[in-house]
Structures are given as structure tokens and as C-alpha cells.
Image: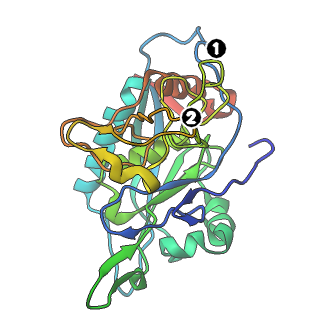
Amino acid sequence: MRLITLIACTFLFNSCASIFTGTNSEVHSSIFQTQEYFSAGSHSEKEKGTTEIFQINLWNIVDTIKPVMISNEQVATLLKDLNQAFGQADIGFELLSAQNIYDNYYTYEDLVADNYKYYYEDLVSNNTPDVIDLYLVDHAESLCYNDGRVRGCRKGHGFTMTGGWISSIVLAKEDINEKKIPIHEFGHFFNLEHTHADYEKQVSSAECKTTGDYLCDTPPDPGAAAYGAMVNFTDCEMYGAYDEDGIAFKPIINNYMGYYPPCYMKEYIFTEGQINRMKSFVQNEKRRTFVNGSL
């Protein structure tokens, strides 16, 4: 990655690991943000409809005392969900290896501690060249609490680098088949930002390419942290949330790159702008070494 800028991913807490109180929120994060994007249509020589295949090397990071392994059925479901979601961007996945056990044991909380110290010093230094290494981790048991009145957990769900310049993704094992969570993190890998990135008010059509997630077909999103309670999850609309100019926020609640729980009647989606950005990003020269072949 060229000049890298670390930006905190704020969600309730000022931390890049997205942490929440409760058990059902779809909260996860990219650990970097980058400001370089690749315009759609810049690689018109690519044959329309050609699927670019990326290999995944899946690692179970296992506690030898209390080992938790992911089943082959869970891996198959993950692969099916990823191929279904990203197929519209002409991106496909295949498993290079599915049941590797990593030598050193880390929990999710170990990896995000001290500014991701162990993640960089150990996991990243051992990444497989030209392959997406997917690390599946446990949570520390102490995260969950029950004081007799209130119970819950404080958990982050996953992280990667926006733009995929480091070729690995970390996910909590319990979230592997939550569908949105892995797809959200892989979306970051293929250069998508959160829909709630840097929005304080509505923007004009002239500003949409330089504000928020830098896409014009994802409306300004004030974020689930502050405004999630103002969403009707039956019709998948936000009501009663306004920017500083009094204009109502109308984010796409069922977008993969937001933080909102699922709507009852709508599947999660990528917009056309998000799909085009991912397609273009795959054609960047720094990504071409990852492409294993075409179908």
C-alpha cells in the first residue's frame, strides 16, 4: 500500500475494533481507510462477464485446551454466500486449503490489542503470497457478563484493510455463517468503505464522489450507532433523522457495508456503484497477482 493513513473506526467507542454492548448487532470494521479509488470503466479490455477467481487459505486459530474448529459444512456455506454476493461483481472464490491450524493461539481481542501488534508481527508476516488468508478466531471468555440484572457481550466481529493491500481477513468463528459479516469484510478487501463513512449532512451531486464512501448511489448514512433505533425494519426505512440543514437521512438500510441489522422483507445488497468499484479494483495491477484464473 502506498502512503497509509490510519484512521480510527468509531462505533460507540473510539477504537478501530468495532465493539458493542449486546449480542445481536452486525458490527465489524476495516482497520485502515485509504483515499485512492479506481474508476469504473478504466479496464474496458476485460471481457464482460468473466469471473475473476480468488483463492482463500482458511486458518483455524485453535486453543489446544478448548479447541473450536469450523466444520466443512460451515466452510461450504461461507463459500456459497461469498460467491453469491460477489458474483454480480464478476468475483469468485475457491478454497486453496480449508482446515489449516495456525501455530500460535490468539483470540480476537489479542489481535486487536496494542494497535494490532500480534496481527502485524505474526499473522501478516506469515501471509500466503497472492492468496487471501482468512483467519478464524475465538473471543476471550471474559467479554461476556451477567451481573444478575443485565447480561451481554462486548464483541468485535472482524477486520481487514480497505483496499486489500494486506492480504488477510480476520473473522470471529461464531460469525462465519452470519452471511452479512463475512461479506462486509470481504467488501472492505475489495475497496468498499462503510456507508456511514464521514457523513454529517447531505451532500450535493457534485460532492458525492469526494465525501463519505465516495460513491453517489449510496445515500448519506448517519450510522446505526446513533440512529439505528429510528429504523423501521419492516419497510427498511429510517424515519425522523435529519441533518444539520433539516434534510431527512434516508440511507440504504439493507446495504452490506452498513451496520444495520437485517430487514424483515429485504435481502442485503451492493449498489451498482459498489459493484463497479469492486470490478475496477480487481483489475488494478496490485490485485492481478491474486487472480487465479477465469471461468
Q: In whole angstroms, how far apart are the C-alphas of marks 1 and 2?
A: 36 Å
Residue 295 vertical position relative to residue 95 in the rendered view, above or below: above
Any mark on residue 42, and which?
A: 1
Residue 269 place in picture, x, y as percent = 35, 32
Dot 1 or dot 2, earlier in sequence: 1
Q: Is residue 169 visible?
A: no
Any mark on residue 103, and which?
A: none
Q: Nearer the viewer, mark 1 or mark 2?
A: 2
Residue 215 vertical position relative to residue 228 in the rendered view, above or below: above
- Please tell me which residue is depicted at 26% across the width and 48% down the height of the picture: 77
Q: Is 251 on the left-hand or right-hand side of 23?
A: right
Coloration of the structure image: rainbow
Nearer to the camera, 206 or 130:
206
Where is residue 200, by image quadrant?
A: top right
Regarding mark 1 in the picture, which secondary structure is present there? Answer: loop
Nearer to the camera, 211 or 110:
211
Regarding mark 2 in the picture, which secondary structure is present there? Answer: loop
* Rendered-image quadrant of the C terminus: top left
Residue 176 vertical position relative to residue 43 in the rendered view, above or below: below
* Rendered-image quadrant of the N terminus: top right
Residue 196 place in picture, x, y as percent = 52, 43
Mark 2 nearby-residue class (10 Å; few <14, some 14–19, many ≥20): few
Q: Is 176 on the left-hand or right-hand side of 289?
A: left
- Please tell me which residue is depicted at 28% across the width and 38% down the height of the picture: 236
Question: What residue is shown with label 2?
Answer: 245
Where is residue 21, by image quadrant?
A: bottom left
- Please tell me which residue is depicted at 64% across the width and 33% down the height of the picture: 211
Residue 254 place in picture, x, y as percent = 33, 38
Q: Is 174 on the left-hand or right-hand side of 14?
A: left
